[in-house]
Image (cartoon, rainbow, N blue to C red):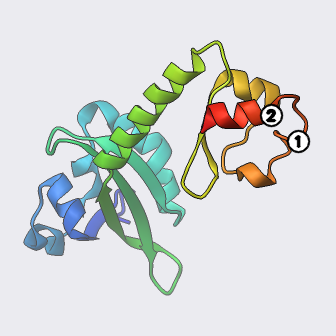
Amino acid sequence: VLDDGTLKVFDMNVAAQRLFGVSPHDIAQGIFATDFIPIENYEAFKQNILPTLQRGESVTIKESTEITSGYWQSTITPIKNKNGEVYRITIFSKDITAENEREKISALLQSAIDSWPFEFWARDNEGRQILQNRVSRERYGNLIGLNVEDSSLYLNYEGSENLIQRAL
């Protein structure tokens, strides 16, 4: 931590280097953490994230950038000296674009099945519930992750054999 309270980055994994467009040489010289913050986000960084780092606590953020396409998750970790003072920070980033896209598709699918006026659920090859719509959740509670055989759903509902056949 410099006298003015700013932090310098001295270590980044390859993904973070690619995300922020810096070379190993640049990092070895030390780069101000604020060099990675867009001007419009600087005040929020200064008020919220910087104090957390200065206390020696890690911060994880999800972001999209103009430097590279996609979405990234970065964990910023302060490094303390033997006196307990933060003197460097490291940044570990990973590309979460595929994960982010899966979450969007999953939310879209969930929204679609929640609009259906009848019960719906689906299970995986091992018999665990993996999808359930709003009508089914309201009637039986959240069944996600439960196994069909372990669920009291079928024992307490008249006509359960028909329901099982419809779900399969």
1 or 2: tag closer to the N-terminus:
1
Q: Quadrant of residue 119?
A: top right
Q: Which residue is depicted at the point 39% across and 33% down? A: 105
Q: Is residue 58 left or right of residue 18?
A: right
Q: Give the labeled residue for mark 2.
A: 160
Residue 1 shows up from this direction:
yes
Task: Give the answer, above or below, for where 63 lies relative to 121.
Answer: below
- Residue kind at label 1, given as amino acid type: Leu
Q: Position of residue 118 (x, y in %)?
A: 66, 17
Q: Give the labeled residue for mark 1.
A: 155
Task: Give the answer, above or below, for where 91 lies relative to 36.
Answer: below
User: In terms of depth relative to the viewer, which is nearer, 47 or 125?
Assistant: 125
- Label 2: which secondary element: helix
The quarter of the image holding the N terminus is bottom left
Q: Position of residue 111 (x, y in %)?
A: 52, 22
The quarter of the image holding the C terminus is top right
Q: Which residue is depicted at the point 33% across and 39% down? A: 101
User: In terms of depth relative to the viewer, which is nearer, 141 or 67?
Assistant: 141
Q: Which residue is depicted at the point 34% across and 56% down? A: 6
Disc 1 to disc 2, C-alpha distance? 7 Å
Q: Position of residue 46 (x, y in %)?
A: 41, 43
Q: Position of residue 91 (x, y in %)?
A: 33, 64
User: In terms of depth relative to the viewer, which is nearer, 124 or 24?
Assistant: 124
Q: Is residue 123 left or right of residue 106?
A: right
